[in-house]
């Protein structure tokens, strides 16, 4: 049998082809996951360092330049080296082929190159910590001219490495994205129509499309930045006789930036909507609505970018237009959030750890979305722009969509990665403590924002105006330390369960989608001698006529090959 | 709200929009969380062992929710745009028509200080009586102030929490903000756009003086012209130390030159 | 190869368009957005900076137009090459690829060996203001794309000389080449004809 031969062939491929330069989507998913988790921990620890500095500036843990650099690298790493590899690289690679019943990605070699390009980009960005002048310190948004002129920050190589690392990372995600989009369109199993695709697959496809459609201008912009800095052109720089336009960078950055924040939101929502039906034991509510409105939100996300620039010197009339598009975006998200809520409504909820993670992500996301609306109101944004309110807003969204839904996904799909289950008890403790500590850290930031606490300050102690809330800021720092510390529960659980977790059956969660009919873990090429055939919609929980006595109908079955 | 007390005439717009928007947001948030918690309580496995596959009537409920969200959106959009129209979008002419003649100050942000250029007694820039203050903006109570702002190096942002003023300061462009202070006193200015390693120390203050004090202050500036080092726009990055030379914070108020002797008393 | 077998196992290919072609189109749409950003920037600078028109009078419209001709011809030849190889006329196909290569190289030689050095000698370096920096950046980025296309065609031609027969590879590269051509059709009026 051909497939059998292929599997044997794989076993012979040797250690390097299996674990390092693997073309197997599951191995690439794990590589992306580990790489992303490493940076998550690293970025978290950086945050801990600069928050400690804020709490006790007199200790001089960091000088102001380093403080800015750490804030910058925290943002950069978390968005581009944690969210992107995990939400696209990990979710996409792990779920797409298994869920659509394919044996691998459409372009396995490209997939491998994607990861290794990403790896190189990781090395490049890490290298910026060790070059003279240290890492880039102009904020993750890298506003020019600060980023385009070495004299202004004293950082030279840090900026170059930042820009080159980013360009490499974009290339890696583009390569991955081509796979994520093409595979679901061409390699679906028999019977898997587009409207039967599990929601997370749709979400990864939409996210990859958004990324592809938005990143071009920023790549061009990054090269112009490098030109300005190293060749002496004046795209963004302004000097006596030569005028560039500092706002050009902001336009290019945010034209990419807002779709980008959806890129790192949508797959997270996909994971939540994947787990909710299985936990509630009823079909996902409004499957088509979710897909349709997500696409709608994706298209709108190209028309809102200047809500980051209301008071940045933009034509004030244009700001009104962007404010209105921003406010309109709440409508699709309302539908999506309500659909998810209605999935729980009337269900029979099983409180397993994966559900807890997903549920907390859901709750936190709602707060993030609502506060985004406040920021989208032009006049309110005057007071809130560039304060801790913004920081709280995007952490609410991103922590939900990136961190918590990653925990949920790892907990949920652990059997398909390692053939074992993560420990439920530890995970529940971790989920609950993370949820509470997260809120304790970030809710005060809304208040600090109102009070006028501006972002990216290396110290507040010298500002009498803000002293009334100094205790709150210290409180945030301390809670933040705890928040980072409890994450080690997850690290422990992850590695412990990988080695010594309970062995998992093929379908430990009694879930319906196709990946649960493959063994845990699935072999190379996933389906062995069998062929997956899809027979129904993805979330047939609580079927009207149960065929096998269970309370769910698997989406398809495996046919043995003739 | 923990927001700073408002001493401007337009701050009302920000505060009320912010308050209304925040309250509506809070309401929506509380409602949704109440529903979510209800769901958790009533639909846990032990309480509700058999799930309801089809919810009835949800479409109407969704439509109701959608409509209320749209109403909520319209409230936000109307208030924010209205507030925006009353603050940022106001033209200088309409402001002067309402508040009388403006005090125009040219502001330059630099790493890491603010320079404020005054036209001096003759109200014209580019004349001999122009003078510059470093990190000290002196304005008159109840009088319209228009700031024309630009930057000498990178982007800064001019934020006065009490005055409800925040706007970016950009090299190669001029941005404009206005305010009418209602209360005398000293108020801090913060920079809200990351501008380098001294960003957090880029502090300044706005001194709002009673009209009489302001006039005498202005006169004293004019009288002491010969000692004035002149406009400071030529300074480069890193000159934040030298700027304090022209900072006449202590001298000006004390030197109460007689108003009537002053070269150019303020036209009424 | 393991995955090659794996794919032949799939019983259904629900969509008619083959994976590589879809991938190529996606790649190109990414490129469209990239050049979209560049062209957006050009238009923005053009509107907001006086002196654009004067500067643009110092480009060399003759070389610009000859190069347009080069790319168009080259694009046409590659379309022919694709057609020929599909109908089994491999000899002609190779000849067409060779022609396409020649015109492409001519393009680069004109641009990099004549046009740019002359401009620089006249003093119009990348530091001479908005027009010139965009001129070098945008046409430079485009020229790099041309170079990449030429390398791809060279590899194809070398392989083609042996037993290997291009089918999709040639089509995909041709798609790319047409794209590069179209980008030039935007840059040409923006820089040479205003
Ligand atoms: C649901 C609708 C959303 C709305 C209406 C919204 C609105 C906004 C607005 C108006 C700002 C600018 C605030 C300012 O700088 O003054 C902002 C900032 C931000 N948002 Fe959102 N947002 C939404 C969702 C999201 C999502 C889903 C994410 C990420 C997953 C996100 C991430 C961010 C980030 C990272 C920033 C700060 C950027 C910076 O560093 O300046 N937002 N949002
Ligand atoms: Cu945004
Ligand atoms: Cu600053």
Image (cartoon, rainbow, N blue to C red):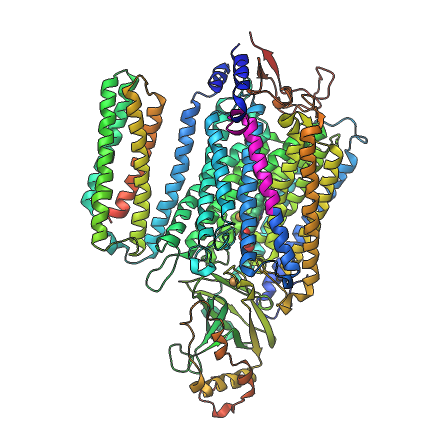
Q: Is residue C121 left or right of residue A90?
A: left
The answer to whether residue A284 is visible is no
Of residues A492 and A288, the one drawn nearer to the viewer in this rendering = A492
Left or right: B213 as drawn, with respect to C187: right
Expressed as whole percent of the image width and height from the top left, the position of residue C47 reads 33, 54
Please tell me which residue lies in front, A150 or C185: A150
Q: Is residue A405 magenta?
A: no
Q: Position of residue C12 (x, y in %)?
A: 50, 16
Q: Residue at x 72, y 30 (%)?
A: A280
Tell me, yes or no, whether the highlighted magenta stretch contains residue A19.
yes
Q: Which secondary structure is most common in the magenta stretch?
A: helix
Residue A409 visible from this viewpoint: yes
Task: Classify residue C91 as left or right of residue A93.
Answer: left
Q: Which residues are magenta?
A: A17-43
**Which quarter of the rendering shows the C terminus of chain A?**
top right
Q: Is residue B221 above or below residue A432?
A: below
Image position of B229 with respect to A54: above or below? below
In this view, the residue farthest toward the left is C62
C96 vs B65: above or below: above
């Amino acid at each position: 049998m051909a497939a059998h031969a292929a599997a044997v062939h794989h076993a012979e491929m040797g250690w390097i082809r299996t674990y390092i330069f693997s073309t197997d989507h599951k191995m690439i998913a794990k590589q992306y996951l580990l790489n992303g988790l490493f940076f998550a921990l690293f970025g978290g620890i950086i945050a801990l360092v600069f928050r400690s500095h804020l709490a006790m500036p007199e200790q001089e843990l960091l000088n102001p330049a380093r403080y800015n650099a750490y804030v910058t690298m925290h943002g950069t790493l978390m968005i581009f080296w944690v969210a992107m590899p995990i939400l696209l690289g990990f979710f996409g690679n792990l779920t797409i082929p298994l869920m659509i019943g394919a044996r691998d990605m459409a372009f396995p070699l490209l997939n491998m190159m994607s990861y290794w390009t990403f790896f190189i980009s990781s090395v490049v960005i890490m290298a910026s910590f060790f070059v003279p002048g240290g890492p880039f310190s102009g904020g993750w948004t890298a506003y020019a001219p600060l980023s385009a002129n070495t004299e202004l920050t004293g950082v030279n190589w840090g900026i170059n490495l930042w820009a080159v690392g980013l360009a490499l990372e974009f290339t890696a995600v583009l390569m991955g994205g081509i796979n994520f989009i093409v595979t679901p369109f061409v390699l679906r199993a028999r019977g898997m129509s587009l409207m039967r695709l599990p929601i997370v697959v749709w979400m990864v496809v939409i996210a990859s499309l958004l990324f592809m459609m938005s990143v071009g201008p920023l790549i061009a912009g990054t090269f112009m930045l490098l030109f300005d800095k190293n060749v002496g052109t004046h795209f963004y720089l302004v000097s006596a006789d030569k005028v560039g336009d500092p706002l050009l960078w902001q336009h290019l950055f945010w034209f990419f930036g807002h779709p980008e924040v959806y890129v790192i939101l949508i797959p997270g929502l996909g994971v939540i909507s994947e787990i909710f039906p299985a936990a509630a034991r009823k079909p996902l509510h409004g499957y088509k609505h979710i897909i349709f409105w997500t696409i709608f939100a994706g298209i709108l996300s190209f028309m809102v970018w200047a809500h980051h620039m209301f008071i940045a010197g933009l034509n004030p009339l244009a700001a009104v237009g962007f404010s209105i598009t921003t406010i309109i975006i709440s409508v699709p998200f309302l539908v999506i959030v309500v659909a998810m809520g209605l999935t729980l409504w009337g269900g029979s909820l099983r409180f397993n750890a994966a559900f807890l993670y997903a549920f907390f992500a859901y709750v936190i996301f709602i707060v993030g979305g609502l506060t985004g609306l406040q920021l989208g109101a032009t006049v309110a944004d005057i007071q809130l722009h560039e304060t801790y309110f913004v920081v709280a807003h995007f952490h609410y969204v991103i922590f939900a969509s990136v961190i918590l839904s990653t925990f949920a996904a790892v907990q949920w799909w652990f059997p398909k990665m390692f053939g074992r289950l993560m420990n439920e008890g530890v995970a529940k403790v971790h989920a609950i403590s993370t949820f509470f500590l997260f809120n304790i850290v970030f809710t005060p930031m809304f208040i600090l924002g109102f009070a006028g606490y501006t972002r990216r300050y290396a110290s507040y102690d010298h500002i009498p105006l803000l002293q009334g809330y100094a205790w709150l800021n210290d409180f945030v720092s301390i809670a933040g330390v705890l928040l980072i510390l409890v994450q080690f529960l997850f690290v422990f659980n992850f590695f412990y369960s990988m080695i010594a977790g309970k062995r998992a059956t093929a379908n430990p969660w009694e879930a319906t989608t196709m990946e649960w009919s493959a063994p845990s873990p699935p072999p190379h090429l996933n389906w062995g001698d069998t062929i997956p055939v899809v027979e129904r919609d993805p979330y047939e929980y609580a079927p009207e006529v149960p065929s096998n006595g269970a309370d769910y109908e698997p989406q398809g079955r495996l046919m043995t090959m003739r | 709200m923990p927001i700073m007390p408002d001493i401007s005439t337009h701050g009302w717009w920000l505060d009320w929009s912010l308050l209304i928007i925040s309250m509506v947001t809070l309401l929506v948030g509380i409602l949704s969380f109440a529903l979510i918690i209800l769901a958790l309580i009533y639909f846990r496995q032990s309480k509700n062992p058999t799930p309801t596959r089809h919810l009835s009537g949800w479409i109407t409920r969704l439509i109701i929710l959608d409509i209320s969200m749209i109403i909520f959106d319209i409230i936000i959009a109307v208030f924010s745009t209205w507030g925006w129209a009353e603050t940022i979008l106001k033209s200088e002419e309409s402001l002067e028509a309402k508040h009388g003649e403006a005090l125009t100050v040219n502001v330059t942000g630099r790493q890491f200080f603010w320079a404020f250029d005054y036209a001096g007694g003759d109200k014209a820039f580019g004349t001999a009586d122009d003078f510059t203050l470093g990190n000290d903006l002196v304005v008159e109570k109840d009088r319209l102030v228009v700031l024309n702002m630009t930057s000498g190096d990178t982007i800064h942002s001019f934020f006065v929490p009490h005055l409800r003023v925040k706007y970016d300061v950009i090299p190669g462009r001029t941005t404009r903000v206005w305010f009418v202070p209602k209360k005398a006193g000293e108020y801090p200015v913060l920079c809200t756009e990351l501008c380098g390693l001294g960003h957090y120390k880029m502090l300044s203050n706005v001194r709002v003086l009673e009209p009489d004090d302001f006039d005498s202050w202005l006169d004293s500036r004019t009288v002491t012209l010969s000692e004035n080092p002149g406009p400071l726009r030529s300074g480069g990055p890193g000159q934040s130390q030298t700027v304090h030379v022209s900072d006449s914070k202590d001298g000006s108020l004390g030197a109460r030159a007689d108003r009537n002797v002053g070269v150019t008393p303020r036209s009424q | 190869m393991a995955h090659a077998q794996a794919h032949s196992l799939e019983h259904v290919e629900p969509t008619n368009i083959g994976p590589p072609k879809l991938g190529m189109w996606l790649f190109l749409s990414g490129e469209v957005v990239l050049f979209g950003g560049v062209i957006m920037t050009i238009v923005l600078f053009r509107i907001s900076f006086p002196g654009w028109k004067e500067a643009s009078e110092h480009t060399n419209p003759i070389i610009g137009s000859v190069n347009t001709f080069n790319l168009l011809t080259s694009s046409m030849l590659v379309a022919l090459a694709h057609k020929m190889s599909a109908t089994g006329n491999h000899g002609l196909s190779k000849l067409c690829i060779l022609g396409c290569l020649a015109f492409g190289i001519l393009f680069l030689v004109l641009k990099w060996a004549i046009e740019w050095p002359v401009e620089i000698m006249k003093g119009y370096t990348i530091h001479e203001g908005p027009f010139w920096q965009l001129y070098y950046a945008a046409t430079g980025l485009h020229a790099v794309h041309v170079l990449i296309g030429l390398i791809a065609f060279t590899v194809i031609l070398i392989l083609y000389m042996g037993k290997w027969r291009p089918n999709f590879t040639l089509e995909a590269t041709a798609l790319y080449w047409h794209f590069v051509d179209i980008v030039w059709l935007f840059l040409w009026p923006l820089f040479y004809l205003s």
